[in-house]
């Protein structure tokens, strides 16, 4: 059985490795100038100014609702293009298994 000091050292190393490998929260992105950040809130993508605390809707619920649907897409994450004119939305992901049949 390892000594208590070794057990504590192992626990500390395990905890630190978890912290180091932790990912930043999904769905929150800083703007290029660093003065505001974007987040998904109430089904919309919002830009929050960190200096004034002013919020601006960038993508509305209506824009996130497909034609013929009544509810907007559930946004898990998003990415703006370099020029800021387009947005890639990550939503409705499912695990897909692929295999190569032989026959």
Image (cartoon, rainbow, N blue to C red):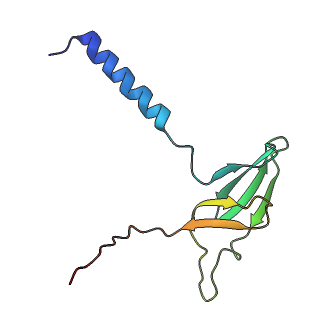
Q: Quadrant of residue 12?
A: top left
Q: Which quadrant is the N terminus positioned in?
A: top left
Residue at 76%, 55% (x, y): give it: 47
Percent x, y for residue 19?
Answer: 47, 32
Q: Quadrant of residue 70?
A: bottom right
Residue nearer the viewer, 52 or 84: 84
Q: Position of residue 22 (x, y in %)?
A: 49, 39
Q: Is residue 87 left or right of residue 91?
A: right
Q: Is residue 16 above or below residue 6?
A: below
Q: For the view shown, which residue lies furthest in the bottom direction? A: 68
46 over 65 or under it: above or below: above
- How far from the left and from the top, in percent, is residue 38? 71, 53
Horizontal side of residue 49 vs 12, given as left or right = right
User: Where is the C terminus found, in terms of image quarters?
Assistant: bottom left
User: Residue visible at 30% across and 73% down?
Assistant: 99
Residue that appears at 64% across and 78% down? 65
Give the residue displayed 62% in from the left and 82% down from the top: 66
């Amino acid at each position: 059985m390892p000594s208590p000091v070794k057990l504590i050292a192992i626990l500390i190393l395990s905890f630190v490795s978890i912290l180091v490998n932790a990912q930043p929260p999904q769905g929150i992105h800083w703007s290029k100038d660093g003065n505001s950040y974007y987040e998904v809130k109430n089904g919309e993508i919002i830009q929050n100014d960190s200096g004034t605390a002013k919020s601006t809707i960038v993508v509305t619920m209506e824009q996130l609702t497909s034609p013929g649907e009544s509810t907007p897409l559930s946004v898990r994450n998003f990415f703006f293009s370099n020029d800021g004119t387009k947005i890639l939305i990550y939503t409705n992901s499912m695990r897909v298994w692929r295999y190569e049949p032989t026959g």
